[in-house]
Image: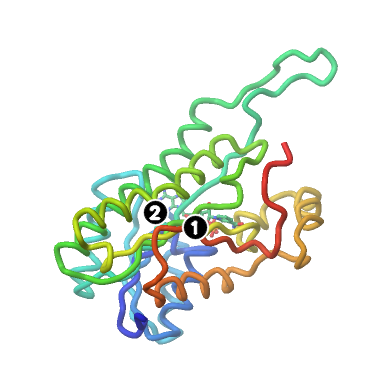
Amino acid sequence: MLTIKDAVAVITGGASGIGLAVARYWVEQGGKVVLADVAAEALAEAEKQITELGGDVATVVCNVTKEEDCGRLADTAIEKFGQINLVAPFAGIIMDGLMLKTDRETGKVEDKMGLEQFQKVIDINLTGVFLTVRECAERMVNNDNRGLICLVSSTGSLGTAGQLNYSSTKAAMSVMPKVITAEFFRRKFADKIRCVAIAPGYVGTPMVKNMNQKALDRILENVPIGRLVEPEEVASLVCELYRNEALAGDIFYIHGGLRLGSKG
Ligand SMILES: NC(=O)c1ccc[n+]([C@@H]2O[C@H](COP(=O)([O-])OP(=O)(O)OC[C@H]3O[C@@H](n4cnc5c(N)ncnc54)[C@H](O)[C@@H]3O)[C@@H](O)[C@H]2O)c1
C-alpha cells in the first residue's frame, strides 16, 4: 500500500470541481499538489484554499491542448517537489447538442453539431489527457517514481444522447488504462506506475450544477441514492485507488447506483 504523505499529485482542471476536491483531500492526507488550469483567477483562488489547509502547492496556468504547456507542467512538479506520484488529468468540458436537430413539424434537419463543437471537446478531453499523461509519465519513468495515473471517464462513456462529442472522449478514457498498463507491462514497470480510470455518474460540480434545473431533476429520478455524488466522495475513491497497488488497468464506477446504459 502506498501512503499519500509527502507524495506529489499533478492535477489538471485543478481550479474547480473534482480536481479541486482531489487536491483538498490529497493535502489533508499530507500530500503535495501541483494544480493546473486554464482559468487563471480560479486557479489563484484554489491555491489560496489549499494553502489555508496547510498544504504545499504549486500552480501552473496551463492549456492542456498545448504540448509545451503540458511539458512545463510536468517540469514544474519535478523542479518544485522532485517527483510525481499521482497524475490526475481532470480538465474537461461539455458542449452538448444533437448531431442532427430536426424540425418537429417538417422532420427536416434544421441544425447540426458544428465541427468546432465536436473538435473542441476532443481536443481538451482526449488530446489534453494524452499530452498531460505522456509528459508526466515520462518524468515518472526517468525519475524512477512510483504511483498512479488516474483518468476520468464517465457513465456517459456508455452513450448519452446529446453528447456524441463528450461520450466519445469518455469511452476513450475507459480503454486508455488497458493500453497504458499493457505497454508498461511490456517494458517491466507496470508494478511501479499503474493506470486506472474512474467513471463518475452525476457529481455536484459546476459542470453539472450549471445544467438547467428541469434536466437535473430528470437525472436525479434515476439515481437510487437520490442525490448527486459529492466531489469529496470521488476524491476519496481516487485516493484509495492510489493507495491500493493491486488496482490497475481497470475502470471504477462511482454513480450512486445509477442505471447504466443508454436510454437513447
Ligand atoms: N461533474 C460530473 O458529473 C462528472 C461526471 C463524470 C466525469 N466528469 C469529468 O470530471 C472532470 C472534471 O469535471 P468537473 O465536473 O470537476 O468540471 P469543472 O467544470 O468543475 O472543472 C473543470 C476544470 O477544467 C478546466 N479546463 C477546461 N478546459 C481546460 C483546458 N483546455 N486546459 C486546462 N484546464 C481546463 C476548467 O477551467 C475547470 O476549472 C471532467 O473531465 C469531466 O468530464 C465529471
At x 67%, y 53%, the residue is 210
| Left or right: where 91 falls relative to 4 | right
Q: Residues within 10 Å of mark 1 (few under 14, many from 20)?
A: many
Measure how far apart labels 1 and 2 are at the Cα level. 8 Å
Question: What is the three-letter code of the residue carrying label 2?
Answer: Pro
Q: Depth check: give the residue in front, 229 or 206.
A: 229
Question: Which secondary structure lies at badge 2?
Answer: helix
Extreme residue in the left direction: 142
Q: Which residue is mark 1?
A: 251
| Left or right: where 12 falls relative to 165 | left
| Left or right: where 189 falls relative to 223 | left
Q: Is residue 220 above or below residue 125?
A: below
Figure quadrant of the N terminus: bottom left
- Residue 183 coordinates in the image, percent (x, y): 26, 51
At x 51%, y 63%, the residue is 16
Disc on the earlier residue, 1 or 2: 2
> Marks 2 and 1: in contact by CB < 8 Å?
yes
At x 27%, y 59%, the residue is 73
Q: Quadrant of residue 102?
A: top right
Q: Is residue 228 above or below residue 98?
A: below
Question: Which secondary structure lies at badge 1?
Answer: strand
- Residue 246 coordinates in the image, percent (x, y): 39, 71
- Residue 191 coordinates in the image, percent (x, y): 27, 67
- Residue 7 coordinates in the image, percent (x, y): 31, 78
Question: What is the three-letter code of the residue carrying label 1?
Answer: Ile
Q: Which mark is residue 224?
A: none
Q: Which mark is residue 177?
A: 2
At x 74%, y 13%, the residue is 108
Q: Depth check: give the residue in front, 221 or 49.
A: 221
Tell me which colouring the rendered structure shows: rainbow
